Image (cartoon, rainbow, N blue to C red):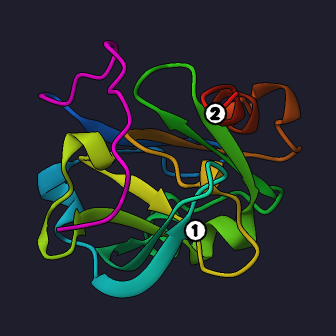
Amino acid sequence: MSDLKRHEIPEAIETTEWTLDVIGAVDAPLVLSRHELESFPHESITDEFACEEGWVADGLRWYGIRVESILDRAAPSDASEYGLVRALDGEYACSFRLDRLAESILAVELDGAPLALEHGGPARLVPEAGDRDCWESVKWVSSIELRETEPTAADTAEDLALSRIA
């Protein structure tokens, strides 16, 4: 059982008809169902998760799709430099440089089981280890929007995440 802390699930989260939309500055926009995601290569990473609240969950085994493979299928435009990852709640969104986003995993399992809703299922963005902040691990991912410019005004992740621990 994972040591990953559980947070309240926003009422707006509805996963029955979940799809992942890949939109914006792409030549081939995508709408991918859970079943369609199974056609992508999957991989596992084992990592720790450290939260600004002061807790750490060690040895989490995430299983999912390298975002680069999803982006390759969407064919980003030559001018694409950023990605905005949005959550199903319609409020939470986090921006990344495209190269950094491509290195992330879109996790669909945690510790050998389907990713539970309380941990961000059906899909959660897990950025590469290293210099990352906990709010960059977007739960309930609904879309990845590629942009040519940095979407700073649309990036709500840090403010929303830190408001939970105030």
Q: Name the residue tied to disc 1.
A: 127
Task: Specify whether 132 is left or right of 136.
Answer: right
Residue at point 64%, 65% (across, down)? 101
For this orientation, the residue located farthest to the top is 11
Instruction: Provide residue 107's location: percent of width, then percent of height.
Output: 34, 64
Q: Please name whichever residue, 10 or 147, is drawn nearer the observer in this view of the structure.
A: 10
- Measure the C-alpha gap from mark 2 to mark 1: 21 Å
* Label 1 element class: loop
Q: Please name whichever residue, 3 or 134, is drawn nearer the observer in this view of the structure.
A: 3
Residue at point 60%, 28% (across, down)? 164
Residue at point 67%, 52% (across, down)? 52
- Of the 4 image quadrants, the one containing the C terminus is top right
What span is in magenta? 1-16
Q: Please name whichever residue, 75 or 62, is drawn nearer the observer in this view of the structure.
A: 62
Residue type indicated by callout 1: Pro
Q: Name the residue tied to disc 2.
A: 165
Query: Would you say the magenta stretch is mainly helix, strand or loop?
Result: loop
Q: Nearer the viewer, mark 2 or mark 1?
A: 2
For this orientation, the residue located farthest to the front is 54
Instruction: Provide residue 84's location: percent of width, then percent of height.
Output: 66, 43
Q: Quadrant of residue 137?
A: bottom right
